[in-house]
Amino acid sequence: MATLWCEYAWLGGDGVEDGVEIEIEGARIAAVRIAAPQVPGSERLEGVVLPGLANAHSHAFQRALRGRTQVVGADSFWTWRELMYRLAGTLDPEGIHALARAVYGEMAEAGVTVVGEFHYLHHAPDGRPYPDANETGRRMLAAAAEVGLRVTLLDTCYLHGGIGKPPDAVQRRFADADADAWAARVEELLPLAGTGVRIGAAVHSVRAVDPASIEQVAEWAAARAAPLHAHLSEQPAENAACLTAYHATPATVMEDAGALGPGFTAVHATHLSDADVDLVGRAGATVCLCPTTERDLADGVGPASRLVRAGAALCLGSDSHVVVDPFEEARAVELDERLVTLRRGVHTSRDLLRAATERGYRSLGWGDGGRIEPGALADLVVVSRDGSRLAGLPAASLVDGVVHAASAGDVTAVMVDGRWVVREGRHVALDVPALLREAITP
């Protein structure tokens, strides 16, 4: 049994509580006491203690693109994608492992305790399966274990190079022969699920998976109570192609295939019609917003507040890792919508923190995490008040201050599964900047 005494802790409300005692037994929170005096033998945590932060959408290998895609002129998502494809064609399993370990270390130092890896680098660069068909998936899981993060491997079904098109030379490394081949391969990963690991499913997009195959993936996930994620309406061109081919929007295609529901997470959902918003909301689905990537790729600003009013939940991801900063992702949901609506206070700081914590955990299949309460997973983040960003804030302003001013650099300690993985702002076992330098080819 370990006892922590928190100067301040956020327990899910509009403000923080002071003098919070947290008892940890193994990998769980055993007890929480408010306004408790510090007892001898307890560990004092200065600053604000939060539940673990969830990064619900990651493509770890894309971290190598940071700072290399800012083309001046006629640039778009589609030109960025060509650069991403070029990178994907160069990576072997060792390179994939090295990148994943480094970026997961960067996430840990930013306060992330669980990551959803939307994984589609399945095969060799020439498209041939490795002798172990799940070589790269196992590498991702190993990388997370070495860092000490929880991980949900969202193994991604990717079949086509566009609606009705075969995969091109680069896309062949992403693609399985069909949904049956995808399912057979992912079945081999299921024994790896356990402490620290979940195996989920993903549909890359309606561009890459046909409706009948989406239905197969959805049935596979439902039968195993596994999370199901999909890129949805990220670009207007995706919507236009879907309407031409299927006379329906991507959201309607997902609904008709049986994918929409409480276990479904729509990633981006930037260009939804009003009917799509109602459809996703009525299904009780989650929407994963990735604002720093969406703004970097000029995707647009999604209808976050309308989705919430319709019944959807929100969570957050760093996607291509333009930056790794969960606080920036959280406040960007509110700040980007302010630019579009010309209104302030659309999303409360409490709700943005819930998106960053418990709702992300739930999206990834960890329904018992992302909260500080008895029985919850012992995943915690300590945010310092000593830096300039939070200096001078009274206790009554700390929730707003953390969401709207803190950064990854203010994280001083991170606990996952009852064990400290970050202390004094640095990973306890890994030199993360050195790993990033080694993993990213100049």
Image (tube, rainbow, N blue to C red):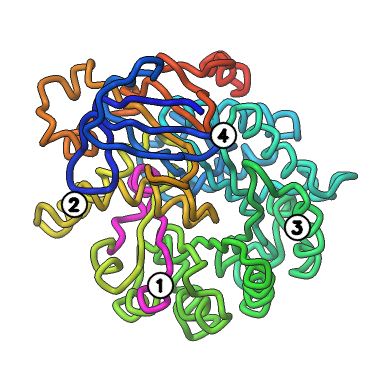
Badge 3 density bin: few <14, some 14–19, many ≥20, Cα 10 Å: many
Q: CA distance from mark 4 to mark 3?
A: 31 Å
SS at badge 2: loop
Q: CA distance from mark 2 to mark 3?
A: 39 Å
Whichever of callouts 2 and 4 sits on the residue coming sooner in the sequence is: 4
Q: Image check: 244 left or right of 442?
A: left
Give the residue pinned by disc 3: 186
Residue at the image position 35 percent from the left and 58 percent from the top? 314
Residue at the image position 16 percent from the left and 51 percent from the top? 339
Q: Amino acid at mark 1?
A: Gly
Give the residue pinned by disc 1: 284
Residue sitting nearer the eye, 189 or 57:
189
Give the residue pinned by disc 4: 26
Which image quarter holds the C terminus?
Answer: top right
> Which of the labelled discs sits on residue 348, or is there none?
2
Whichever of callouts 4 and 1 sits on the residue coming sooner in the sequence is: 4
Q: Image check: 124 left or right of 100?
A: right
Q: CA distance from mark 2 to mark 4?
A: 33 Å
Badge 2 density bin: few <14, some 14–19, many ≥20, Cα 10 Å: some
Residue at the image position 53 percent from the left and 16 percent from the top? 428
Badge 1 density bin: few <14, some 14–19, many ≥20, Cα 10 Å: many
Q: Nearer the viewer, mark 4 or mark 1?
A: 4
Whichever of callouts 4 and 3 sits on the residue coming sooner in the sequence is: 4
Whichever of callouts 2 and 1 sits on the residue coming sooner in the sequence is: 1
- Dots 2 and 1: beta carbons under 8 Å? no
Q: CA distance from mark 2 to mark 1?
A: 20 Å
Q: CA distance from mark 1 to mark 3?
A: 26 Å
Give the percent coordinates (x, y) of residue 321.
46, 37
The verdict on residue 283 being magenta is yes
